[in-house]
């Protein structure tokens, strides 16, 4: 039973390009959560999605960031027109429903903007 | 407001020493959950433990132990007889019953275990 799969592991983008980060949840999981870890900081909640629905995007920057979790396929975190400050590790977790039993995170995608 | 404080930014110990990582939290909820995660140099996040607010029993798992004290809002983590493989950044996190999917992470403690 594969865990949460994120790809790519490392992504380098030039300023102004778009970044697409993918997250495939564990089998049977229909809830996905994205967190961002800026250098030397803890993780911060970005967005919570269920299949075809955004439940809570209170942690998402207002501009350039979007997320989706389609009926088929992985969840996508999309960052348009990336800037140096977007350089971070982006982690995804999944669950069947509430996660008070503890997230299993994917291995993360490390985005570097040059 | 919810908050998790890990005051120790970095700790260095010599192998076989015991080390305690501190975690202090703030919450207004009476029902909440506390977690510890390990982030080794490879970067992934490894779940270590979950504790709910109604269970103040301390827990031991091999060389790891956790001390939960509601009176001081602390959830400290001790590694006994540390090993080089314990070198990592350790994060404490809080989730409240009113928003269980939204974890509040501390800034982490970097542990270096020297051979």
Image (cartoon, coloured by chain):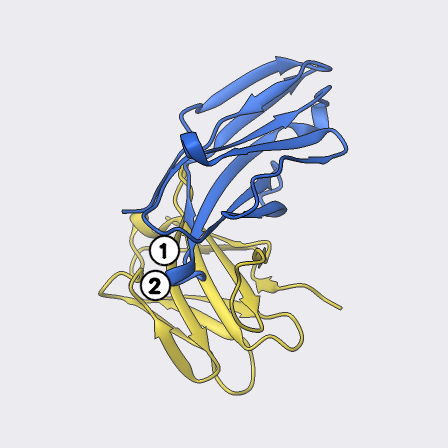
Question: Which element type, helix, strand or loop, lies under badge 2?
Answer: loop
Q: Which mark is residue B114?
A: none
Task: Please report, as a chain letter, where disc 2 is located.
Answer: A
Task: Please report, as a chain letter, where disc 1 is located.
Answer: A
The reply to whether label 1 and label 2 mark residues of one chain is: yes
Q: Quadrant of residue A46?
A: bottom left
Q: Which mark is residue A14?
A: 1
x then y, percent, for residue A24: 59, 71
Other residues around mark 2 within 10 Å, as few (<14) / some (14–19) / many (≥20)? few
Residue occupying the point 49% across, 47% down: B53
Q: Label 2, on which residue?
A: A17
Q: Quadrant of residue B72?
A: top left
x then y, percent, for residue B9: 44, 24
Question: Which element type, helix, strand or loop, lies under badge 1?
Answer: loop
CA distance for labels 1 and 2: 6 Å
Name the side, left or right, on which A82 lies relative to B19: left
x then y, percent, for residue B23: 46, 32
The chain that appears yellow in the image is A
The chain that appears blue in the image is B
Q: Residue furthest bottom?
A: A71
Compared with B53, A17 (above or below) is below
Q: Nearer the viewer, residue B101 or B52?
A: B52
Residue occupying the point 30% across, 48% down: A85
Name the side, left or right, on which A18 lies relative to A21: left
Q: Quadrant of residue B84?
A: top right
Q: Are marks 1 and 2 in contact (CB under 8 Å)?
A: yes
């Amino acid at each position: 039973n594969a865990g949460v799969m994120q790809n790519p592991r490392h992504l380098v983008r030039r300023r102004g390009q778009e970044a697409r980060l993918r997250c495939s949840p564990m089998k049977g999981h229909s809830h996905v959560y994205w967190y961002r870890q800026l250098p030397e900081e803890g993780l911060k909640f970005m967005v919570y999605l269920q299949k075809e629905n955004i439940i809570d995007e209170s942690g998402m920057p207002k501009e350039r960031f979007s997320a989706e979790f389609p009926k088929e396929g992985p969840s996508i975190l999309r960052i348009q027109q990336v800037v140096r400050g977007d350089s971070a590790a982006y982690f995804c977790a999944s669950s069947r429903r509430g996660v008070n039993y503890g997230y299993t995170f994917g291995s993360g995608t490390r985005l570097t903007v040059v | 407001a919810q908050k998790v404080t890990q005051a120790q930014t970095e700790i260095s110990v010599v192998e076989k020493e015991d080390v305690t990582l501190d975690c202090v939290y703030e919450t207004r909820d009476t029902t909440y959950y506390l977690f510890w995660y390990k982030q080794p140099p490879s970067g992934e996040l490894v779940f270590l433990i979950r504790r709910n607010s109604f269970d103040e029993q301390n827990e031991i798992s091999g060389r790891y132990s956790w001390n939960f004290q509601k009176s001081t809002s602390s959830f400290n983590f001790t590694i006994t007889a540390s090993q080089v493989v314990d070198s990592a950044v350790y994060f404490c996190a809080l989730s409240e019953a009113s928003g269980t999917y939204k974890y509040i992470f501390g800034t982490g403690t970097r542990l270096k275990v020297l051979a």
